[in-house]
Image: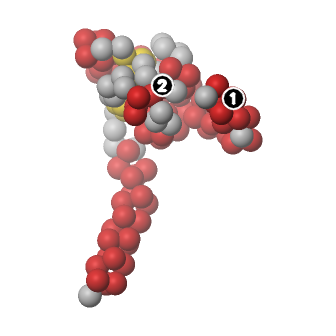
Amino acid sequence: LLAAFALSSMLGALAGLLTAPITLTRFDIGIMPLPDDDWTRGKCGLKGLQYMALGIPTVMSAVGVNQEIIRHGENGLLATDDESFYQALVSLIEDNALRNRLGSPASLYALVDGESRRDGSWLAGRRRAI
C-alpha cells in the first residue's frame, strides 16, 4: 500500500512537471515576488526564466540573481518594494505594446544567455564570490 502511494505521488509530481509549461502559456504576465532575505537571495530565478523563455513579460523582485537576469525595461521589470511591483503590473496590464516589447527580448535572453551559462563559468564565478 505504501509503495502504491509513493508511486502515485511520484506520478502526480511528474504530471505536474509536464503540464507546467502548458499552464504557463496561458499567462499574460509572469510574476516572481520575493522578500529580500538570505533564503531568497540564494534562489536561482527559475520561475522568472520559465516565463521569459515563453516570451511572457515578467516582473521580478530585485533580489539575488534576479538583478542579473532582468535588465529593467529591456527584457522585464524589476521591483524593489510592493509599490513598485504594483506599478510594474499596472504598466503591463494597461500597455499591450510594453508587454510585447518586453516579452520578445525576454525569450531571447532566457534561451541564449541561459544556454551560455551552462558551461559552468557563471557558477564558478559565484563559487569564487562566496
Which residue shows up at 69% across the image and 29% down it?
A: 128
Q: Check disc 1 and report its element: helix, strand or loop.
A: helix
Which residue shows up at 29% across the image and 83% down it?
A: 2
**Corner quadrant of residue 16:** bottom left
Q: Disc 2 designates what residue?
A: 64
Residue 70 position within the rendered picture, expressed as x and y whole percent measured from the top left: 51, 22
Residue closer to the observer: 123 or 114:
123
Q: How many marks?
A: 2
Pick whichever of labels 2 and 1 is earlier in the sequence.
2
From the viewer's perspective, tell me whether residue 33 is left or right of residue 106: left
For the N terminus, the quadrant is bottom left
Q: Disc 1 designates what residue?
A: 128
Label 2 to label 1: alpha-carbon separation: 16 Å
Residue closer to the observer: 42 or 12:
42
For the C terminus, the quadrant is top right
Circle 2 or circle 1, nearest the eye: 1
Categorize mark 2 by other alpha carbons within 10 Å: few (<14), some (14-19), many (20+): some
Q: Amino acid at mark 1?
A: Arg
Residue closer to the observer: 105 or 50:
50
Question: Disc number at residue 40?
Answer: none
Identify the residue at the far front of this view. Answer: 130
Categorize mark 1 by other alpha carbons within 10 Å: few (<14), some (14-19), many (20+): few
Which residue shows up at 30% across the image and 14% down it?
A: 81
What sort of colour scheme is used for the picture?
secondary structure
Cβ–Cβ below 8 Å for labels 2 and 1?
no
Q: Amino acid at mark 2?
A: Gly
Residue 118 position within the rendered picture, expressed as x and y whole percent measured from the top left: 69, 42
Which residue shows up at 46% across the image and 21% down it?
A: 76
Residue 68 position within the rendered picture, expressed as x and y whole percent measured from the top left: 56, 22
Up-down relation of residue 4 to residue 58 (above or below): below
